[in-house]
Amino acid sequence: MRTKIKNTPFKPTTSGKMKKYIAIFILMISFVAAQSQQEVMISQYMFNGLVLNPAYAGTHPYWSGSILHRSQWVKFDKAPKSQTLCLDGPIANGKLGVGLNLSNDAIGITNQLDIGGNVATRVSLGAGFLSMGLRVGVTRYSANLTDAIIRDTEDPVYAQNINGTIVPRFGAGLYYYQRNWFAGVSVPSLLAIDENVSYNSAGLNSFYKSHVYINGGFVFEPSPEVAIKPSVLLKVQGSAPVELDLNLNALFLNKFWVGAGYRTGDAMIAMVEWNITHQLPLGYAFDYTLTSISDYSSNSHEVMLGYDFGKDVDLKARSPRYF
């Protein structure tokens, strides 16, 4: 039977002044929700919350890293391919969390390289913790527009390529968690200084639109050998339908995750993860496309490898954290 150890390396208190800051933070994030636009999402985000939310940084007492590769619609020429690297952990005796995101997305004639630094601080709130995070990063955007097949050959938008335009970007998030449930809201791109990306850009956030992620989930343990984790992710978009991810994952013998998901208007997802050791997980996800694109390519594949380390990593084996 698992030994329950409360995973709280420090116990801060929430002052009246801090509550005011939290309220301001929530209002700032809510302000952009009405105009949000979705960005590309991976399927195994529930195994590394830093992909979605900078406030996730440092919420474990140990350091955690992961690398991931995704090949989407594998039968298409120049189909989307993505690689991510995430690393985060606690500093200052657990009072702060820091993290690093690297991602590379190649889609058709475009390529986007993102580098982001995350910092988060947390306060005790009720029986859990509220973490508030910020992300500061840059995007290198390239597009071989002259390779595009177009009808209007005089359109100045396609007159020349975009060669490595640098775009500073800033994001924020909130993340609340207890041992057996969590909830978060994030805007990874609150502000993008992107007026130089394309011919028709006309100011801040004219190319990279803000998008909002709202997610949550909980864990229950019907027996010492089984843990069940349902979770949900809402992706709010300004100019497209709201998208909802519904996921259900089960952990057996604290070793093997088996899960399934449904992404509205897009795909069914199957995923597995093997905890080779309590420090080394290996995961795989398979997306089966439900849209008309399935007539040409119905499969997407995703592989993830993680590694947890640090002086407190043994806490994970004695008292597992499921998110």
Image (cartoon, grey):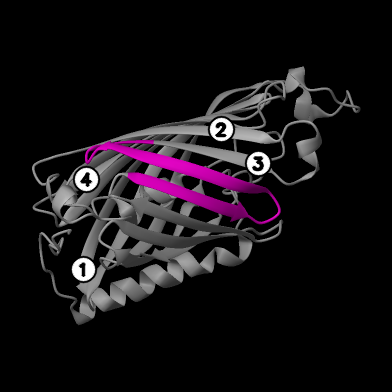
Compared across the picture, whether 6 is left or right of 204 comes to left
Between disc 2 and disc 1, the foreground one is 2
Specify few, some or many for label 2: CA neighbours under 10 Å numbering under 14, 14-19, or 20 or more: some
Q: Identify the magenta region.
A: 256-282
- Kind of residue at badge 4: Gly
Note whether 203 is above or below 283 in the view shown: below
- Do labels 2 and 4 touch, CB within 8 Å? no
Q: Is residue 110 left or right of residue 155?
A: left
Q: Secondary structure at mark 4?
A: strand
Q: Residue at x 76, y 46 (%)?
A: 291
Residue 43 visible in the current orientation: no
Picture layout, residue 71 above or below residue 320: above
**Which residue has dot 1 on it?**
123
| Residue shown at the point (27%, 49%) measured from the top left | 254
State how many labels appear: 4
How crowded pointer 1 is (Cα within 10 Å; few <14, some 14-19, many 20+) is rated as many
- The quadrant where residue 309 appears: top left
The rendered magenta stretch, by its main secondary structure, is classed as strand
